Image (cartoon, grey):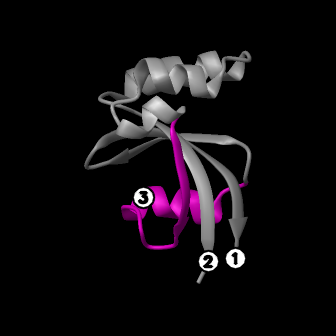
Amino acid sequence: MATACARHILVKTREQAEVIKKKLAVGGDFAKLAKQHSLCPSGKKGGDLGEFRRGAMVKPFDNVVFTKPVLKVHGPVKTKFGFHLIETIYRND
């Protein structure tokens, strides 16, 4: 079963996610921005979700983690929780 390690920043609106993504694009610190803005409890850990299996997360989130390039910030990705900026740290297919 494929596993991956990822971190994310969860916010309420696409606009918030876009603003944070722009900060990341100019060298903003992902962990610091996650601590400041993420609505997910993982924000306290810099957005770190640890390692998880394919299928453990909601489908749109899972699709990004298991198909998009690693070590790049993807999103905003809309789920029932809000809008995510997602960075896959590593993936074992």
| x 42%, y 58%: residue | 60
Answer few, some or many: residues within 10 Å of disc 3's Cα (few below 14, many 20 plus, some between 14 and 19): few
> Based on the displayed image, in which of its 4 quarters is residue 3 positioned?
bottom right
Q: CA distance from mark 2 to mark 3?
A: 16 Å
Quadrant for the N terminus, please: bottom right
Q: CA distance from mark 1 to mark 2?
A: 5 Å
Q: Secondary structure at mark 3?
A: helix
The label shown at residue 93 is 1
Residue 60: which disc?
3
Where disc 1 sits, the SS reads loop
Of the 4 image quadrants, the one containing the C terminus is: bottom right
The answer to whether marks 1 and 2 mark residues whose Cβ atoms lie closer than 8 Å is: yes
Outermost residue, front side = 45
Residue type marked 1:
Asp
Most foreground residue, 22 or 56: 56
Q: Nearer the viewer, residue 72 or 54?
A: 54
The region drawn magenta spans: 47-69
Three-letter code, disc 2: Ala
Q: In the rendered structure, which amino acid carries the disc numbered 3?
A: Pro
Which label's residue is closer to the chain start, 3 or 1?
3
Residue 66, located in which quarter of the rendered image? bottom right
Q: Position of residue 49 (x, y in %)?
A: 51, 49
Dot 2 falls on a residue whose secondary structure is loop
